[in-house]
Image (cartoon, grey):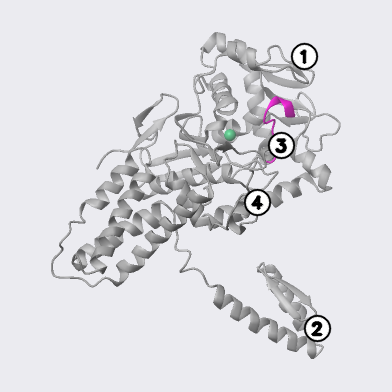
């Protein structure tokens, strides 16, 4: 078999994958900031690294996959320094900041479950690792690469650059360029150099999320959490660090700087970055009106969407492109993905009904190897999908009696599809799990029983039914024409 090659953003080339500890893989992926609903920008890294996670496990590695939850409100770019995003939203909605974070964490999980994204091995919250972040900041100060200024702590990018020449090693940015592109911003006078980034920020009075530290009551800078939690759960050096390309600078560049300041080397052996998603050729953004949440895709409730798209259509669409290519979402492209996905599921069903022959008129032995070769070539899922479509063609030809397969070859095709379609690419057959009619029938029966209880003034039973359905996520609504339900 071909060895596994991974494109390393740091070296700009495909490298042979060799884990630091034999048979084990440590992988860290930057997770969501939980102050808003999950959108396509969340789906792509989640699905990309889900497939990496699934494949590494499939080929025999024991994988510890860490994906964090950013819930302390980070400084996405310096323009936001005065305003902690989670706290801002909390004030507007009159909720506890942690209530907002929990609400969106739950919604993120629900969307990821729908997309059949496996939960990581550890999902640490930044808010649960403030101490580790404070320790990290202290170590960077002790190493001489950070300074305290008015209660805040900044990373000394110029000193780091003088000593290591490494700032920009991942993103290719150079400090001169940063100097010319960094705008004048609030709090700038605290920094010795405009490119310095915050490790700890003193909280302004309006900040709700704040913690004690040796320097001030405040909150950690955005980049410290991934360094602190990656080190805590995976060690000073681990195998794979992943995330979206948009995180390369300043986030990942700063993670490398922080880790190098403390240990003399970056956090990982392989940096992997998924490319971005555009919508109808445009960058996605709230101000552009093309910001479509995952829920809106699933329900079709957005003016740019012609119809609803199921989670598997979205997943299939994302996997049809290599993770390092850009993906453009349009209704046409999604409808094509919906058809492609349905064709694959139909072929799998047809395969289960094929009549075996004594001999095979087509050779199907090579498909398994071809799929492995594609996965081993930097997780090339579009090539895997093209092989699966070739298999679907064979299946349909045999079904039309224009070719023959032995039982052994039918079993071989089924094995390849089970492995690559379901286990590795994580697709599932939505049609077969569609129990809508059954659920509707059962609900009608339950609501009938409840109506009878109400008619008999048996309020205890009717309330019990309503409350227990509620805990299952079914809302009962009483109306003039009887009760209805909503999942
Ligand atoms: Zn991160």
Q: Quadrant of the C terminus?
A: bottom right
Nearest to N terminus: mark 1 or mark 3: 3
Note whether residue 145 is visible: no
In this view, the residue in front, 19 or 75, is 75
Q: Nearer the viewer, residue 442 or 211?
A: 442
Mark earlier in primary sequence (2, 3): 3
Is residue 112 shown in magenta?
no
Q: Which residue is mark 2?
A: 459
Helix, strand or loop at mark 3: loop
Residue 115 pos. (x, y %): 52, 54
Tags 1 and 2 in contact by the CB under 8 Å rule?
no
- Residue that mark 4 sits on: 303
Secondary structure of the residue carrying numbered label 2: helix
The magenta region covers: 71-80
SS at circle 1? helix
Q: Residue beneath label 1, please? A: 189
Q: Which residue sits at x=74%, y=85%? A: 451
The earlier-in-sequence mark between 4 and 1 is: 1
Which residue is the site of mark 3? 73
Mark 3 or 4: the one toward you: 4
| Residue 465 marker | none
Q: Answer yes or no: do the residues labelled 1 and 3 have beta carbons within 8 Å?
A: no
Camera sees residue 302: yes
Q: How many marks?
A: 4
In three-dimensional space, the C-alpha distance between marks 1 and 3, rounded to whole angstroms, equals: 22 Å
């Amino acid at each position: 078999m071909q060895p596994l090659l991974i494109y390393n953003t740091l070296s700009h080339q495909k490298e042979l994958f060799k884990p630091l500890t034999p048979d084990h893989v440590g992988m860290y992926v930057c997770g969501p900031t939980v102050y808003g609903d999950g959108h396509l920008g969340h789906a792509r890294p989640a699905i990309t690294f889900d497939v990496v996670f699934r494949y590494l496990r499939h080929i025999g590695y024991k994988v510890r996959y860490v994906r964090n939850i950013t819930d302390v409100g980070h400084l996405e770019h310096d323009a936001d320094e005065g305003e902690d995003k989670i706290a801002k939203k909390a004030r507007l909605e009159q909720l506890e900041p942690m209530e907002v974070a929990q609400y969106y964490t739950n919604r993120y999980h629900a969307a990821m479950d729908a997309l059949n994204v496996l939960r990581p091995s550890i999902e640490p919250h930044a808010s649960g690792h403030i101490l580790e972040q404070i320790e990290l900041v202290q170590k960077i100060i002790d190493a001489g690469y950070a300074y305290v200024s008015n209660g805040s702590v900044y990373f000394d990018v110029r000193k780091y650059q003088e000593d290591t020449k490494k700032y920009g090693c991942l993103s290719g940015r150079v400090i001169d360029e940063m100097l010319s592109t960094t705008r004048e911003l609030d709090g700038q006078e605290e920094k010795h150099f405009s490119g310095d980034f915050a490790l700890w920020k003193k909280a302004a009075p309006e900040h709700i999320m704040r913690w004690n530290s040796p320097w001030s009551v405040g909150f950690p800078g955005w980049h410290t959490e991934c360094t602190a939690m990656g080190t805590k759960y995976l060690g000073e050096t681990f195998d794979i660090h992943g995330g979206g390309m948009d995180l390369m600078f300043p986030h990942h560049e700063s993670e490398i700087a922080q880790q190098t300041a403390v240990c003399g080397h970056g956090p990982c052996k392989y940096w992997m970055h998924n490319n971005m998603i555009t919508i109808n050729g445009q960058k996605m953004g709230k101000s552009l009106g093309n910001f479509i949440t995952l829920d809106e895709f699933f329900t079709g409730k957005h003016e740019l969407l012609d119809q609803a798209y199921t989670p598997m259509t979205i997943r299939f669409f994302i996997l049809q492109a290599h993770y390092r290519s850009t993906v453009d979402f349009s209704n046409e492209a999604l409808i094509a993905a919906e058809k492609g996905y349905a064709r694959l599921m139909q072929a799998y069903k047809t395969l289960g009904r094929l009549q075996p022959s004594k001999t095979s008129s087509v050779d199907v032995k090579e498909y398994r190897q071809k799929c492995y070769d594609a996965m081993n070539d930097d997780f090339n899922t579009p090539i895997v999908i093209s092989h699966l479509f070739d298999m679907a063609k064979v299946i349909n030809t045999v079904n039309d009696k224009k070719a023959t397969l032995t039982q052994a070859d039918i079993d071989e095709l089924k094995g390849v599809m089970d492995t690559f379609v379901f286990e590795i690419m994580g697709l599932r057959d939505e049609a077969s799990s569609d129990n809508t009619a059954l659920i509707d029938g059962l609900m009608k029966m339950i609501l009938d029983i409840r109506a009878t209880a109400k008619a008999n003034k048996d309020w205890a039973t009717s309330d019990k039914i309503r409350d227990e359905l509620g805990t299952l996520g079914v809302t009962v609504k009483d109306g003039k024409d009887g009760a209805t339900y909503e999942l």
